[in-house]
Image (spheres, rainbow, N blue to C red):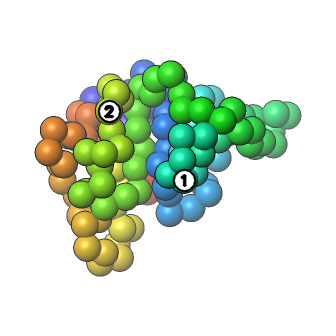
């Protein structure tokens, strides 16, 4: 599955950390329901929405019921604790920066869906 096919099949993306605010904003502009985990607490979630071409953020105070895809910009060692119910996983590495734990690869029982990595989707 190529990156465009993957994104067409996704309704909700859970974004956990990102290298730029462009990631959640670009996804919502593409028509995808975007939920961002903004901290370690159970209420640290935001929903990004498009309102008249302006990206707005609201805070529902809870995790999403489900996510079709999890986008993560975190070290591999953290992924098993992050991913519990996603159908797909996209993990973006260090964008050419040598950061320990940010290399491409799997994480225990977490694997990229269709071989797609975040750098393939976002640049």
Q: Is residue 111 above or below residue 98?
A: above
Q: Tell me what residue is drawn at x 62 percent, y 57 percent.
A: 21
Q: Tell me what residue is drawn at x 16 percent, y 38 percent.
A: 109
Disc 2 crowd, CA 10 A, few/some/many (<14, 14-19, 20+): few
Q: Quadrant of the N terminus?
A: top left
Front position in the image: 1 or 20 = 20
Front position in the image: 42 or 55 = 42
Q: Tell me what residue is drawn at x 25 percent, y 66 percent.
A: 101
Front position in the image: 40 or 6 = 40
Q: Where does the image place residue 46, in percent across and percent down from the top left?
A: 65, 41
Front position in the image: 51 or 123 = 51
The Cα–Cα distance between marks 1 and 2, rounded to whole angstroms, is: 17 Å
Q: Is residue 74 found left or right of 47 in the rendered image?
A: left
Q: Which residue is mark 1?
A: 39
Q: Identify the residue at the far right of this view.
A: 52
Looking at the image, is mark 1 or mark 2 earlier in the sequence?
Answer: 1
Q: Is residue 107 found left or right of 91 in the rendered image?
A: left
Q: Quadrant of the C terminus?
A: bottom left
Q: Where does the image place residue 8, in percent across and percent down from the top left?
A: 46, 25
Q: Where does the image place residue 4, in percent across and percent down from the top left?
A: 42, 33
* Secondary structure beneath label 2: loop
Q: Which residue is mark 2?
A: 84
């Amino acid at each position: 599955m190529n990156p465009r096919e993957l994104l067409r099949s996704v309704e909700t993306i859970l974004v956990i950390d990102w290298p730029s605010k462009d990631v959640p904003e670009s996804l919502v502009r593409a028509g995808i329901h975007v939920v961002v985990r903004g901290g370690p607490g159970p209420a640290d979630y935001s929903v990004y929405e498009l309102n008249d071409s302006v990206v707005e953020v609201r805070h529902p105070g809870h995790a999403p019921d489900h996510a079709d895809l999890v986008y993560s910009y975190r070290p591999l060692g953290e992924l098993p604790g992050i991913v519990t119910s996603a159908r797909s996983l996209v993990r973006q590495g260090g964008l050419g920066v040598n950061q320990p734990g940010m290399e491409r690869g799997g994480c225990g029982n977490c694997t990229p869906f269709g071989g797609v990595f975040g750098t393939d989707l976002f640049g």
